[in-house]
Amino acid sequence: MLYLCEKPSQARDIARVLGANGRGDGFLQGQGITVTWCFGHLLEQAEPEAYGEQYKRWSFASLPILPEQWKLEVKKSGAKQFKVIKALLAKAQHVIIATDADREGEMIAREVMECCCYHGQISRLWLSALDDASIRKALGQLKPGADTEKLYQAGLARSRADWLVGMNLSRAYTLAAQYSGQLGAKSGALSVGRVQTPTLRLVADRDAHIKHFEPVDYWDVSAICLPHDAPQTFKANWVPPKGKEGIDAEGRCIDRALAQQIATSCKGEQASVLRCDTERKRQNAPLPYDLSGLQVEASRRWGMSAKQVLDVAQALYETYKLTTYPRTDCGYLPRSQHADAAAVFQALVQTDRNLSPLVTQADPSRKSKAWDDSKITAHHGIIPTAAKGSIERLSESEFFIYDLIRKRYLAQFFPAYEYDQTVIELDCQGYKFRASGRVDRVAGWKIAYQEPGDDTLVKSDKDAKTDETAQALPKLTVGDNVLVQDTETLQRQTKPPAPYTEGTLIQAMKGIAKQVENPKLKAILKENAGIGTEATRAAIIETLLTRKLLEREGKKKCLRVTAKGNALISMLPNAVKDPALTAAWEQALEAVANGEMLLEQFMEKQQTWLLKVLERAKAGAGGTTPEALATEFRPKPAQPSTAQSTDIPPESKICPLCGKAMVQRTSKYGAFWGCSGFPLCKMAVNIHTNTRRGNAT
């Protein structure tokens, strides 16, 4: 029996539980059991030139690149381990896939097995945590291999679609940019991706909004009110009536004179109570974190990058065994794990004695809304495990993330947070004023977020926006009068949206439906349909930064689009950069994973879309209609290079190798026609002899 893991550390954990302690070269062994490992993806998609010599040159004539038989190549860094696995597979009759329990993990194992022509029995070890108890439980619940094979098909669909878009459109739009003069010879190639380009578009649109934002001045009127039978004042704000002169569509007063008139006329006057309502409200504990939520929170609190959070969460799961699988898009928990609460509590205290007072207050029998099997996806929310560790071993960033995870878990075992929300509406001289206030009644789950000795409850971002919500309001009756002691006119100004941080960009990528204005697309997109996946969003942002399409700016490390990124976005059609369409592709990949769409159907749709985009790219590059492209970019037959050759007559000036314009240049050998795609294309023709003297690269 052969266990195929994703990485060495994972293999060691599983082998320890299986009792496979014998060491081999690239594997561990026990009685009748062998455990081996990959190093992530041991195989990678072959480069275009593997499909033909013509693809070594970047030219419109060689596009599209549509492999009929897809080729994989063994990574140099993993060549030795691949040989080990291949030899083990040749002798194996039963393979248990023990890679990460997701689309990529399934692909890592099965692409190796397929490349090595393995045809024996397959089972699946589905792990959500790497502590011993979780491994033993999963070993007793092996899945048939057929249950997860569709994940492999979805992984292939994603990998091949990304390759098609990246290889074809990066070449096409780099050539188009050079052809139109938007990209210099030293600027490097443009990078187009099925997911990264729409992500870049989000940042470019936000930056453009900020750049062109025109602030609008508006005025608020606040009143300090004193009840007749209470010594404590409260603050109320004027409510501008919509549709009236001086009030804009957003309900803001844009007429300074009007605001000053109201403040003057109401000061020192009596106001009658129109409404005074107090409502007891309950707020349940937030769900355990999914990866996006963890990345957003860590970015907001400490400015941590998405990749940094993922790496830390992976270490907490893989190295320390303190938390469960991090690459999850779900915050809910299986009911069966509720019984583990007492053991998890014990592990939390043994890992960090300082947590003992908080754990003592938690009720392990309490079951929050998080425990819901019907809402579990491939993985449950990120929670602590029953493994005992040492808090001293953690770095500062590891402790930050661990603390977020454990407190969100503990919050599930506290009652709801309760508060009284009071709203008072007043009439003064015909103008309506409103006051709102909140008084905490039951701390509930917010106790989990209090520091020792601190009685202050955690406020939500919404609460923190205004101090008025914290004021305690008096009990008044409709018809009562209060004195408006003083008024104040406050000048405000509308503000542009904040630049994206990595956290808020991930929020936008995940909740892409909120960014879509088209009502039909908005209706199609589900709330969980987004750009990329939990496992890939951090890498997408890092790729954009590495390729100089995005950059970090300022202390808050805001993301800004670069000049190169703006140039790319400006020349691309919506079909390539529209986030909504990319989210729709993600839904299609989910359909493949669920068995609702075949891999072949997905690829056929992807290729049809790609051909249309390429046609437009070629048309834009040559400034011609699509109909003319068939002639202009058709590969020309090779002819012998003789003095009488007419490969490039001066009147056409079109490069026969890449289809770009030829320009007149001069060298020590005399005048010649040179390809404008130089240095990517080195085609040259002597003007007087009309003979070639160059090669495309």
Image (spheres, helix red, strand yellow):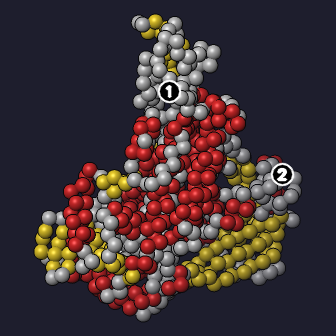
Question: Residue 323: x, y in percent?
Answer: 34, 74
Residue 535 versus residue 386 in the image, above or below: above
Q: Secondary structure at mark 2?
A: loop
Q: Quadrant of residue 146?
A: bottom left
Question: Residue 365: x, y in percent?
Answer: 42, 93
- Residue linked to disc 2: 246
Q: Residue at x 13, y 68 (%)?
A: 24
Q: Is residue 205 left or right of residue 554?
A: right
Q: Is residue 52 left or right of residue 636?
A: left
Q: Secondary structure at mark 1?
A: loop
Residue 652 versus residue 273 in the image, above or below: above
Nearest to N terminus: mark 1 or mark 2: 2
Residue 390 can be seen in this image: no
In which quadrant will I find the N terminus? Answer: bottom left
The amino acid type, in three-letter code, at marker 2 is Gly
Which mark identifies residue 667?
none
Q: Residue at x 29, y 78 (%)?
A: 94
- Residue linked to disc 1: 638
In the image shown, does 326 or 42 lie closer to the viewer? 42
The span from disc 1 to disc 2 (Cα, nearest Å) is 74 Å
Residue 688 versus residue 257 in the image, above or below: above
The amino acid type, in three-letter code, at marker 1 is Ala
Question: Residue 483: x, y in percent?
Answer: 76, 69
- Judged by depth in the image, the label closer to the viewer, 1 or 2, is 1
In which quadrant will I find the C terminus? Answer: top left
Q: Residue at x 58, y 23 (%)?
A: 654
